[in-house]
Amino acid sequence: MDKTVPSLAEAVKAVPDGAVVMIGGFGGSGAPIELIHALIDRFRETGSPKNLTVVNNNAGNGRIGIAAMIDAGMVAKMVCSFPRSSDPRAFTEAYLEGRVALELVPQGTLAERIRAGGAGIPAFYTPTSYGTELAEGKPVAEFDGKPYVQERWLKADVALIKAHKGDTMGNLTYRLAARNFSPLMCMAAATTIVQVSELLEPGGIDPEQVITPGIFVDHVVQVTNPQQEEALIREGAVH
Amino acid sequence: MKLNNAQMAWRAAQDIQDGAYVNLGIGAPEMVARYSVEGRTVIYHTENGLLNFGEAPPAGQEDWDLINAGKRAVTLKPGASFFHHADSFAMVRGGHLDVAILGAYQIAQNGDLANWRVGSKGVPAVGGAMDLVHGAKQVCVITDHVTKDGQPKLVEACTFPLTGVGCVTRIYTSLAVVDIAGGRFILREKLAGMSLDELQSQTGATLHTEGDVADLSVPEL
């Protein structure tokens, strides 16, 4: 078994038009910049993939990453909890002009919906958002005397993930707080594509240290010395 | 005379017990960490997936993979741990946090909180606020007592969109410390130089008292 692919372009070549794409990261921490930019490059060359629904905690920052996807015109909808950033122009303009739709989800509900999607749980009840406008239209039920809101699972066609170490079987570790949504998204996508800084042979990661088991991973591509989104934004980078 | 953000944060910090697990909202609530009471160990949680983080590193030494929910660079204390987002919010909703401290636009006398948007214009953003108001054993607010225009923030019923229903239990304002119980504001402390009538005139719902009202005294900060 070898899940490695030789290039970023190869890794993202099968993402279809209209796909739901989960993208790991919280702000710049854990953002798979190289995979995102490979997807944008493919769109610029071929016009595909377009009409994407992107799931991420945020909605892009500056002129790179998800913001550059929006600028390129390949995003139809964002599913996120906090579509603001230090430089939110790309999403703000697209949203206010009606070019990109928004499904706003409380952060913990977003995480749990993704987890549920990966775990085969079609719906669950949470106290979060009860009595607020984000609960409108959702079923409410009482458990032990308290009201809870029903939320549905969230699944994706593709997940784009940045990990630290990965082996050829797809076992992964993450760096510091860059873990955030990524282990959940690996579980919830039909095809999970991961960029790793260090690519190892099976056994190269201590089994006790594996965070995402390879069963949740389909393709692994090595990107040594990956770019860090926040650092790029502070440099004023544009893709 | 009113307390500044640092003084409100200092006052809130005095109530955090040794060994508490605490989540601080972005902005003024974050300042609470600066005023941890000596001799008490407080473990701070940040929603993006980290327990027991410390202050920002010196400028130029940031590692942008090591950030808090406000996307500021932080450091690790001994005994820190990382976890994914679903575990992080399990800590929140599952009743494992002792205290959550948030900011507010309005707080109603029944504990309703409005702190995520003031109208229907612009780009809505909620983050983890709606999650944080459920599950922590104590949900507290740090806020100016009135808005910049002098309108009360402590009200009978919120007019801004709600973050949560009946969730706030204690409010640290620039003028007073107020508890919420039984659908009422209960005044615990007020600035020594201020009469109850003066304070009531800046409050949008009745302030009840139960026994003595203590002086709200804080150091110069």
Image (spheres, coloured by chain):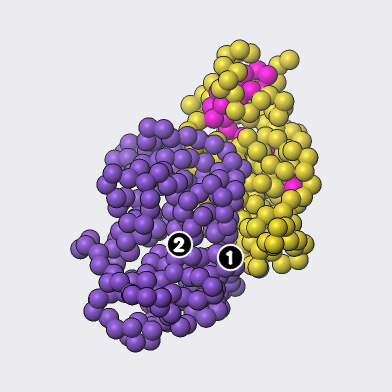
Chain colours: A yellow, B purple
Say whether residue A156 is left or right of residue B78: right
Residue interval drawn in magenta: A153-174
- Which of the marked residues, 1 or 2, is nearer the chain's N terminus? 2
The residue furthest front is B211
The reply to whether the magenta stretch includes residue A166 is yes
Give neighbour class at mark 2: few <14, some 14-19, many 20+ (Cα, 10 Å): many
Q: Residue at x 37, y 71 (%)?
A: B188
Q: CA distance from mark 1 to mark 2?
A: 13 Å
Locate residue A98: give its quadrant. bottom right
Q: Which residue is mark 1?
A: B164
In this picture, is B125 found above or below A184? below
Image quarter in which the N terminus of chain A is found? top right
Front residue of A203 and A47: A203
> Where residue A188 sits in the image (x, y, percent)?
72, 39
In this picture, is A101 found above or below A188? below
> Where residue B129 sits in the image (x, y, percent)?
54, 58
Closer to viewer: mark 1 or mark 2? 2
In this picture, is B95 found above or below A225? below
Locate residue B64: give its quadrant. top left
At mark 2, the secondary structure is strand
Q: Which residue is mark 2?
A: B140
Parent chain of label 1? B
Circle 1: residue type: Gly
The reply to whether the magenta stretch includes residue B139 is no
Q: Residue at x 40, y 40 (%)?
A: B53
Front residue of A175 and A31: A175
Q: Which mark is residue A40?
A: none
Q: Residue at x 37, y 36 (%)?
A: B77
